[in-house]
Amino acid sequence: MPSRKFIIARGPIRWFLMVSKSVGIAMPWGRAYLLEPWHQDRLTRLHELVHLRQIQREGAVRFSCRYLWWLMRYGYWRNPYEVEAYAIEAEARERRGAPGKERRSKRLTA
Ligand SMILES: [Zn+2]
């Protein structure tokens, strides 16, 4: 996969990731921004790649609207887009037997 798909988050996107206790975010324009310590982490990349595929599959506008709607309706962990991404990530984690780089967890605040 081309590495320009994954960009080290800087400026306002980095700030947003910090305050939302996230490590990465996929954007409708087909790129994922990751905090520097997670930029090379395979599982983090895989997770964001699932979101990039969701964006391709459903279109950027539909994805963005549904993501926000589902976030409000179901919350982060039960948002179907996140459920799909975390399921694929968990499969890969089991296959590889590697835990990947520890995240700062949203569970602490959400
Ligand atoms: Zn996600």
Image (cartoon, helix red, strand yellow):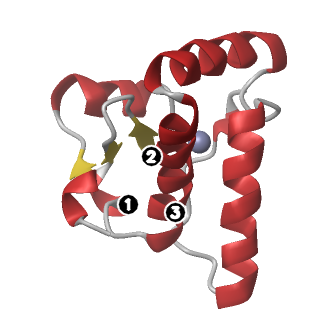
Q: Residue at x 50, y 35 (%)?
A: 55
Name the side, left or right, on which 26 lies relative to 53: left
Mark 2 near mark 1, Cβ–Cβ under 8 Å? yes
Name the side, left or right, on which 58 lies relative to 2: right
Location of ligand 1 given as a quarter of the image: top right
Foreground residue among 56 and 84: 56
Q: Nearer the viewer, mark 1 or mark 3?
A: 3
Which tag, 2 or 1, sits closer to the chain's start? 2
Q: Amino acid at mark 2?
A: Val
Mark 2 near mark 3, Cβ–Cβ under 8 Å? no
Q: Residue at x 64, y 37 (%)?
A: 106
Assign a secondary structure to mark 1: helix
Q: Residue at x 78, y 34 (%)?
A: 80
Q: Which mark is residue 23?
A: 2
Q: Mark 1 — residue? A: 38
Q: Which mark is residue 6?
A: none
Q: Residue at x 65, y 17 (%)?
A: 66
User: How busy is the neighbourhood of tag 3: few (under 14 within 10 Å), some, or many (20 plus)?
Assistant: some
The picture places residue 72, in percent across and down from the top left corner, at 73, 10
Q: Mark 3 — residue? A: 46
Which tag, 1 or 3, sits closer to the chain's start? 1
Q: Amino acid at mark 1?
A: Trp
Q: Amino acid at mark 3?
A: Leu
User: How busy is the neighbourhood of tag 1: few (under 14 within 10 Å), some, or many (20 plus)?
Assistant: some
The picture places residue 53, in percent across and down from the top left corner, at 52, 48
Quarter of the image with the N terminus in it: bottom left
Foreground residue among 70 and 58: 58
